[in-house]
Amino acid sequence: MEGIGANLSTGIPARIFYSVMLLAPSGIRMRMWRGLYQRMARSQKDSNFRFMNYGFTDGDELDLSPEDEGDRLFIQLYNMNIRDVEIEGKEVLEVGSGRGGGASWISRKYNPKSLLAVDYSDEAIRLSQGWFSDQDNLEFRVGNAQRLTLPDQSFDIVYNVESSHCYADITAFISEVFRVLRPGGKFCWTDMRDKKTMEKMHESFVHSGFTIDSWTDVTENVVDALDIIDEGRREMIRQSAPPSLRKSFETFGGVPGTPVYEALKARRIQYFRYLLCKPE
Ligand SMILES: C[S@@+](CC[C@H](N)C(=O)[O-])C[C@H]1O[C@@H](n2cnc3c(N)ncnc32)[C@H](O)[C@@H]1O
């Protein structure tokens, strides 16, 4: 995994995946991530499973409708990422929307003029298009974070949740976001990296042309959420993954006791949120 330097000692497929990821050229790494998410979309078509992030809790309980309650911690990660920007009436882009739960919630809760959500996995996009077709201001399309086929200066806000660790070329991604944002537009980013790569990430933001409005370490909040999610996530993996892949899915899912979780807990992997602004 790019910038997630955990020793994946649990789950043979995860270990092989990790070893190849360390050695493979960036194009192959990206195809491997795509393969993983395509497989997840194919093996788990349950519409109750609308999020693929690690969650967030800070004691501030969001007001949620009963239908969203089961996804509270995943929604709170999305909300933490975008809560300082005004979304109502704006043209918004999500990059790496996964199974679409976050984009669906934001478009219902904050009423943007339009929300376009793109993801590299056409299988995940197909699921999202089927589940959320009744939301008029929301559209899902297949798209690559590093080569967004979207016009210059066409969005007011771009946000990105726990997706960029899969990208082969972070600089290309950041410059694509810069290109599609209007002057004054905001970029809300949240994800994890090992300590060193997070420092490089900071440097990339510093040299991107954006100004950095704020950056926040949310590692502890994410670990707290993983502790709460633990049993539910194990059960979901028991139901959807073949036995030979369960340990690996638990590792990627950040289940307590697996290496990514332990690295987050020991802060060898850190989870950050950046709020960036494209100068006027
Ligand atoms: C951990 S999931 C998070 C999904 C969603 N943001 C959420 O929180 O539920 C990472 C997502 O990033 C997507 N992704 C990976 N590489 C991508 C790329 N180059 N362009 C767009 N999306 C990508 C994957 O297909 C996957 O859906």
Image (cartoon, rainbow, N blue to C red):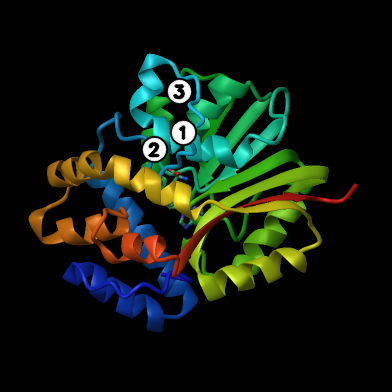
C-alpha span from label 1 to label 2: 21 Å
At x 76%, y 46%, the residue is 181
Question: Residue under circle 2?
Answer: 126
Q: Are marks 1 and 2 in contact (CB under 8 Å)?
A: no
Q: Earlier in the sequence, mark 1 or mark 2?
A: 1
Amino acid at dot 1: Ile
Q: With 199 as the anchor, is 122 left or right in this view?
A: left
Residue 133, numbered label? 3
How many numbered tags mark residues here? 3
Q: In whole angstroms, how far apart are the C-alphas of marks 1 and 3?
A: 20 Å
One can see residue 54 in this view: no
The residue furthest left is: 243
Q: Amino acid at mark 3?
A: Ser
- Of the numbered discs in the image, which one, if any, rests on residue 124? none
Closest to the camera, between mark 1 and mark 2, is 1
**Is residue 140 or residue 243 the one in the foreground?**
243
What residue is at 63 percent from the left and 60 percent from the top? 173
Q: Does dot 1 land on a helix, a strand or a loop?
A: helix
Q: Quadrant of the N terminus?
A: bottom left
Q: Callout 2: helix, strand or loop?
A: helix
Secondary structure of the residue carrying tag 3 is loop
Per the image, the residue denoted by label 1 is 75
